[in-house]
Structures are given as C-alpha cells and as structure tokens.
Amino acid sequence: MEAGSRGDERAWIRGAQSGSVPDLEALFRHHWPRAYRAAYLVVHDAAAAEDIAQEAFLAAVRCLDRFDRRRPFGPWLHRIVVNRAIDWSRSRALRRESGDASLAFVAAAAGPERGDTETLAAALAKLSPEHRAVIVMRHLLDYTPGEIADALNLPRGTVNSRLRRGLDELAGRLEQELR
Amino acid sequence: MTRWNRPTPGEREAADRSWEIVREAFEERIPVPRKRDWRPVPVVAFGIAALAAAFSPPGLAVWGSLRDAVRNQDHLLALPTTGRILVNAQGGVWVIQRDGSKRFLSGYDNAAWSPHGIYLAAARENQLVALEPNGKVHWKLARAGHVGAPQWSYEGYRIAYGVGRALRVVNGDGTRDRLLAVSAGGSGLSALAWRPGTHELAYNNGHNHLVLVDVDRRRVLWRRSATGLEQLLWSDDGERLLVADEGSRVLDAAGRTIAALPRRSVLPAAFVPGRHSVALVSVEKGLSTVSVYSGPRYSRRRMVFSGAGLFGGLAWSPNGHWLLIDWRSADQWVFLRSASVRRIDVRNIGNTFDSGPEHHATLAGWCCP
C-alpha cells in the first residue's frame, strides 16, 4: 500500500492524537505490511514477527501523545521493529532448547511466481540476524546506509561492510539453492 | 535484489489480530497532555494513597485518572500482552493463551514451563511427564514415590524434580535419570532453582544448608546455611539469587550476601525480567504490599500495589511490561503495567479455574516471548 503521503500521515497522527480510531487504523493499515515483513524476514517465524510488529505498534500507541508530527512515522517504527527482531533472533540462537523445532520457513500460499520469493527468503534465513537486518532495511524498506546506521546505532562503515558481506553471502546461498 | 512487495506468510491474518489489540490499547490509553510528567501518578499503593487524598480536590482528580485507568473484567478475556500463563489448579493444570482461551490438562500437578514454553513438565501421581501445552505427551518416567516440583534448566536439557524427599535429575528428553540427593527439601522442594546459562542447581539439602551444585560434574560449588528455606529464584543473568528463608536476602553467584531485605517480606517474589530488581510481597496488619527493590544494595524500594488479605503469586510478563498479582483474598488477578497506571482487574478467578476456597489455583509462570 503506497498510498498515504506525508500529509496523510501527519493528518492520521494528528487525528489519532485527538482520539480518532479511524485515523489510527489508517496509520496502522498503512504501516503494518512493511513492519511485519521486515520482522518476518529477519526472524523467519510468523508468530514472532506478529508479536514484534504488534509490540512496535503498541509502543507507538503508548508514545502517541508525545510523538512529534513533523517526524516521519515509518523510520521510528522500523527502528523498533528491526532492533527487536535482531534481539529476538540472537536470543533464539542462544537459547535453542531440546527438541525445539528449527526456524522453519513457513511457505506462503501457493502462487505462480512464488518459487523465487521462497528461494530468496530461504537464502536470507541462512544469514546472521545482523546481515539480514541491514539487507532488509536497505532493500525492503529502502533506507539509505546512513539511515540504517542511525536506526541500528552503528557506524556507517559497519553498515556498508555488513551490506557487502551479507549480499555476497546471499548470492552464494542463492546459487546453492538454485543449483 | 529488488524490493519485496509480496505479502509474507501470515501477514494479513496477523494484521487483523494485531489491529484488534492495538485498537484496544488505544481506547484504554490515558491521553497524556504534551510534556506533562506522569511519573508521580503510578507510584501508588492504590488503596492507601487514594484513600488518603480522596477528599481533597486534587485527590479527586487523581481518583479520576486512576478510575479511568482501571479496567474491570468479570472473567479473564485475554492476556494484556504476549505469552502464555500456566496455572496449577485442583485436578489439573490450565494453560491460558494470549487470546484468553484456556485448556485444561486433567490429572497433572506441579507443572512448569520449559524455557521457551514449548513443553511442560508435570507430575502425575508417581510419574514425571513431559508434554506439550495441547496435552500431547512426549515421555513419562515412573518413580517409586510421589513426584513433585519439576524444573527445567535454562535450555531445557535437564529437569530437576523431587521423589519423596529425594532430588533427581533427568535429561530433557527423558533419558539418564539419576539421583542427585537422597534428602533434599526441608519445607518444600519448590526451593530449588537452576542457575540460568549453566547446569548448576541451587537447592536445600535438607540439613539447613543451601547448596549450589554443578549437576553434570556432581560437584558442590558452595554451601550456605539457610533455615526454613521456602523459595529460591535466580535473576535472568544468573548473577543474583533470591533466598527466601527466615529472612529474605539476595546473594551473588558466589553465594555472598549482597543485601538483606526486610524480614516481613515474604513469598511470593519475582525478579524483573532481564534485571536484578525484584518484586516482593510483604504483609503487615492484614495488608499485603508488592514492592520492587532495586539498586546495587537493593536499597531503593518502590511500592506498586497494596490490598487487603493475601497475595498468592506474582508473575512478570515475558517482556517485563506487566506484573500479574494473584490477589487470592479478593479472588482476583490484577494485571499492572510496570510503567504506567494502567491496570486490569479480573474477578472470579476461583470460578475460572474451578477452584474453591479450599483449593487455590496457583500461578506457575508466564511464558514466553
């Protein structure tokens, strides 16, 4: 959903701050897909992605009254989502328990062009959470390396090197997947 | 790589579910005037502070804010945040899902969550049983005596449990069951706790000693005297151990006392997830109070809730945002937000879990992110 200019967004936030549920819903529906996809592509677990995206929106609701309408909402939300997704992935990797199922990739509903998407997601799942996060932010959410550095609290050089290494590794994984 | 424009699995259904929760949170929120500091408001021993100030005009304003912040429910409709709650009740165990749905697992007792809430370990007469929250049994282990108080190690590879007065350990997959101590316990085998990140188990050895044992190497790491030990709790990082015996104290991982907490602080208690702060209940003159102690020497005390009668259990939500208080005397569960005034009271807890006044349902954990 690409509709929704900055002007619309400011109006939704203003409306929500004054208690309008329809305005909050417009804001939610506009930002949910990218927030959820970003979480999903980092954690590769639908339930966790739902919780992470949902918690980010709940955080937004809690801070709504103090939110500065001049600032764009998306980057603020995505910062929360991606940082929580990285934390979740790290914690999952550290605390895998006996008999715990691996992070299974849950296939999307069948579609004629789904193969490439699945392959890409499967290859992405094999990268480290840190590499996944920068690739998702750069190529799914369209942030610049500078914006990613700001959101993840990293030096810009680190973001660039993670992007380069992550994409190299992704290319290698994709080759393996397609072989 | 091109931009990902396809829906990911579960995206649309998750949006609908999440919108309902976000909308509910939005409708319940207290609109905060810009730049106003609300921190004084939540520091509330709810009954005491409000009563003291109730008859002054400012007091009436505070009452209004609090009243607006409290939501009453006659039944448990849903959990306010992520996770699942386990309740040991008469005749079995209840598993409560985030959406409020409840499943009864009949015939089990003393259930405990595995570290990620994928399994439960529970006692069934003389058997230790590992099962899923949907009731699917993975394995059983029959012992000669009554089985009690199973607890999982941090990653689920070990389970400590009692058989009569003995303390045993079995692997998470039901193999390699072995005796750890012939006589453990004292006032109860619930006084055992795995140190997170290790296979070190703290327990009462039955001779008025608290011991920390490396279970895999069968080596005692340290031993401290402890009389009337009732509960042991580790902080998430395994660096602090709360010992509830005749007094309450906090030890470091080497068994050195960091702080002695007020003597009247009694069960139940719960470390704040991911922190060294601890919530404790104290009882004085028929009034129970939950306070959170923090700071390097636990000298900072923040009172968060008071009520007449007894509190039966405390549980933090996995994300640490909510504290659940089992207000047994009022037959209520009280969900308190840890950082604001928001509060949800759920009545009819005894009826919800088919427990009468003689058979209280016991909170056994709020799991997992």
Image (spheres, coloured by chain):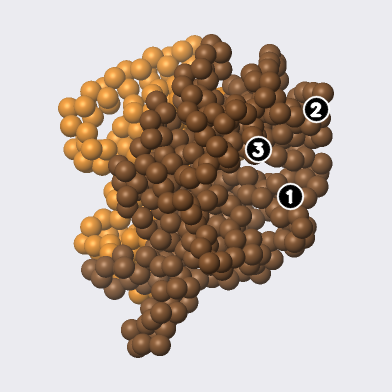
Chain colours: A orange, B brown
Closer to the camera: disc 1 or disc 2? 2
Label located before the other in sequence (1 or 3): 1
Q: Are marks 1 and 3 on the same chain?
A: yes
Name the residue that disc number 1 marks.
B89
Is residue B340 shown to the viewer in this render? yes
Give above or below for B283 relative to B131.
below
Q: In the rendering, at what x and y percent does residue A103 appear?
A: 53, 28
Frontmost residue, B352 versus A28: B352
Spatial CA distance of label 1 from label 2 is 21 Å
Amino acid at the residue labelled 1: Ala
Closer to the camera: disc 2 or disc 3? 3
Q: Answer few, some or many: residues within 10 Å of disc 3's Cα (few below 14, many 20 plus, some between 14 and 19).
A: some
Q: Which mark is residue B145?
A: 2
Chain for numbered disc 3: B
Amino acid at the residue labelled 2: Gly
Q: Where the N terminus of chain B falls, by quadrant?
A: top left
Chain for numbered disc 1: B
Do tag 1 and tag 2 residues touch (Cβ < 8 Å)? no
Amino acid at the residue labelled 3: Gly
Q: In the rendering, at what x and y percent does residue B150 appear?
A: 66, 32
Do tag 1 and tag 3 residues touch (Cβ < 8 Å)? no
Label located before the other in sequence (1 or 2): 1
Spatial CA distance of label 1 from label 3 is 18 Å
Give above or below for B331 relative to B180.
below
Q: Which mark is residue B188?
A: 3
Q: Residue at x 43, y 56 (%)?
A: B291
Q: Secondary structure at mark 3?
A: loop
Spatial CA distance of label 2 from label 3 is 15 Å
Is residue A136 shown to the viewer in this render? no
Label located before the other in sequence (2 or 3): 2
State left or right for residue A8 relative to residue B217. Answer: left
